[in-house]
Amino acid sequence: MHEAAAKPFDARAFDRSLAQAADLLPLFRATLRESREALRLRFQNDGDAARLVHAHAALVDALLVRVWKRHLKKFPPRVPVTLVAVGGYGRGELHPHSDIDLMLLTERGSADDLRDFAEHLLRFLWDMGLEVGHSVRTLRQCAEESKKDITVATNLMESRLLCGDRALHARMREQIHANRLWPSKKFFGAKWQEQIARHRHFNDTAYNLEPNVKDGPGGLRDIQTVAWVTQRHFDTASLHDLVKRGFLREGEYRALVRGRNYLWKVRAGLHYLAGRREDRLLFDHQRALASQFGFRDRRGILAVELFMKQYYRTIKELQLLNEILLQHFQETFVATPRAKPQPLNRRFQARHGFLEATHPKVFERSPFALLELFLVMQQHRRLKGVRADTIRLVHASLPRINAKFRRDLACRSLFMEILRQPRGITHELRRMNAYGVLGAYLPAFGRIVGQMQHDLFHVYTVDQHTLFVLRNVRRFAVPEFRHEFPFLSDLIQHLVKPERLYLGALFHDIAKGRGGDHSVLGEREVGDFCRHHLLSDYDTRFIQWLVRHHLVMSQTAQRDDIFDPDVVLRFARLVGDQEHLDNLYLLTVADMRGTSPAVWNAWKGRLLSQLHSATTRLLRRGIAQPLDVEAHIADLKRDALTHLHDSGLPPERIERFWADLDADYFLPYDAESLAWHASSIAGAAAAELPLVATRWSPELGGSEFLVYAPDREDLFSILTAGFDRLNLSIVDARIHTLRNGFALDTFVVLDHAGQPVSDPRALVHLQESMRAQLLDPKPGRDLRGAPLMRALKHFPIETRVHFTPSAKGNQTIMEVVAQDRPGLLYQVSLALAHCHANLVAAKVSTYGERAEDVFFVNTRQGQPLTDAEQMKCLEAEIVRRLAPASVTPATQSLQF
């Protein structure tokens, strides 16, 4: 038994009670509950997770053994049986709500011989409150299953005798010994591949918003992988034996144990907060753990962000130790022991395919080699990595990266040379970050390492997001990834100096977490870097401009009417020339794709592409020559008629249809879309009205709906209610009123997963459903009755409404910022109807938990909003309708 269990569980007192009890189950149940509560209170006071997990295992040991012995007497099995703890419980480590894995071991026989005994035993254990997982195996089955499945072999390898035949358990351990089933080399290879696959499941990063403490990269499973390999090869469960054998240094061992204990503490806290087994560091628990562990808000940084920063930095250190040890193991188990080193230069050589320093004092004699190492890795593609001893030398030499080091021309030149290499930029900057070199050389980058952004939009820490953005930029330049973004891959080949784009990516978010505008602060930071690294004044200004304006293209495409010539002209004046535009376009796509897997979709890609194309045309024509709108519309009509040549529609009928529309109708659409509208509407019979048409193609980025129906004041509300009932999200809406009393409305929608609906049968069903909605309107969902996603509950967003005149002054731009929820646009439509305002167009953008929607509105008379009372009405009604259910009445009036 563990001494740590003495206070929570008094064995002598329990045995006295046991001898007097008539009914054993209530006593066992109460003792387990009370002892676990005592452990919880002690952990709450001292935070000692190592003490907790061992004490909890000891508690369960004590109770299990007593239950086992009594059941053996009461329900004697037909064959001798031994009770064995396996898995984490076998190691004597048990978190508050972890499963208790048991094996019933026999020399021979079958499960039938133990069925009655096992059923009574397991039922008692579950009834007393133990979550037990079990298996029944003979000696032969242990060997057979271990040979087939490395997971079984691993579980049995760390098994522990609880009660029964000690010799039988020893024979089982002997049968699954390394020399028999899984030799060290084979075992190591399987475990390494297992870790690679597990990391890939988490996108090869531990720096997610809700990381997995156990299975994520750098988590407890990585530490256990090292322990398993150690046990398999050296036949010892002690990690400290790695120090004796030269695999770890004493300081590294202490860091490993310190990191493990910290993760144990976090995991135990998670189990207690969730009241069940929970290994994901969910939003539900992050703030509570931060408070429980003593973190407080500081200088504008939330306590939860400080807590998560410590977590991420712990993970980073553990990942490095894991790399060092696995690389050591690979050399021991896999590499040819007599391989001679191959010189690469005076400071580095290759051994077993790994880079190593030629001398232990190489960084002392030549500090610049701390950067040269990564350049050498780029230039020698056959190298698989860096040897463990060299990684240690790098880590020990980090204090040499000081102000003098940063002033050294050789160091500055090496860093720029790394960025100018044709390959390996992303890999080596990631390696620099992992080894601590990048944060040491660029102190501003060091400050964002592990920096969390506590929202749903940014799913990675700032440093990992930055490296993802750089990776995305580099993928544009790699031929094998050309199929992802063909146009952007062609575009990057024509950049004058790609390193300017790489530096823009590296510095675009470098000032996050300081307060103030990170774009402005980042502009200053990258300016200092460029001047320090002797870039030309022009290149310096170019990169500063990229960092300063890295959000502008995304905001313009998603928030402004990019079919308004004045909007495009304003954007073109900002970029100034094609080189600035192309760099900004590439950076914008890379940034959006690196923010979150859910942020990027084909619709946003289309918006950016349209803005880039429109701006390119304007730059070629000359900013001083604005678009001739009449000539542009004439060209569109001519091209649309060409598309309609084989439709059978007389041109006169099409012209009559167009005559009922204002000039503003033509600007947002291309000729092919205009032809689709005309063929659908001008060719429709009266019985087909109201008309709903749908289409999809990969270029659209969404599923498009065309609606042609008699105009009415509540038409937009009817349509948004219909889309809401179909669980479709509107990302773009355009409303056109014809002179004949009809309305022509177009919508681009995505499904609940943020993807277009492409299946033709599904589109026909949706088309029929929307037509039925027009004929017999039904209300949409009650926003306040709809449940919020789990994560959204932790990021309440205050609803804000802001009004500004449009560029031409003929409309009013109404911006709505609110918590994203199903049916949000429908509620806004009801507010517009309530306050007698018309919608002209809408652009819907979602940033994690925050919806930022832009509505172009006017009065019933087609004029911009000027009445302060009408704007107050809209603001109050939108805020009321989008308020959380907890602060508003549960019902609302929905009438058409």
Image (cartoon, rainbow, N blue to C red):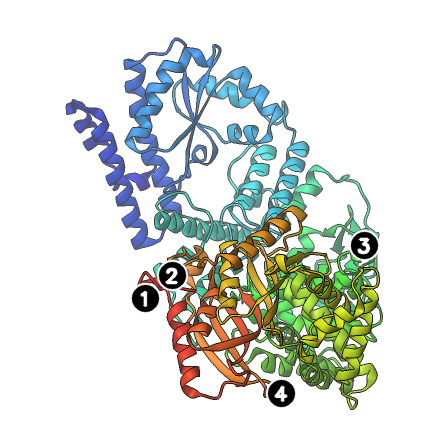
The span from disc 1 to disc 2 (Cα, nearest Å) is 8 Å
Is residue 873 or residue 227 the one in the foreground?
A: 873
Q: Earlier in the sequence, mark 4 or mark 3?
A: 3
Residue contact between numbered discs 1 and 2, judged by CB atoms under 8 Å:
yes
User: To which residue does mark 4 refer?
Assistant: 808
Kindly identify the amino acid type of the residue bearing the numbered disc 4: Lys
Marks 1, 4: nearer the viewer: 4
User: To which residue does mark 3 refer?
Assistant: 480
The span from disc 3 to disc 2 (Cα, nearest Å) is 48 Å
Residue contact between numbered discs 2 and 4, judged by CB atoms under 8 Å:
no
Residue contact between numbered discs 1 and 4, judged by CB atoms under 8 Å:
no
Residue contact between numbered discs 1 and 3, judged by CB atoms under 8 Å:
no
The span from disc 1 to disc 3 (Cα, nearest Å) is 54 Å
Res. 691 in view:
yes
Marks 3, 2: nearer the viewer: 2
User: To which residue does mark 2 refer?
Assistant: 784
Q: Earlier in the sequence, mark 1 or mark 2?
A: 2
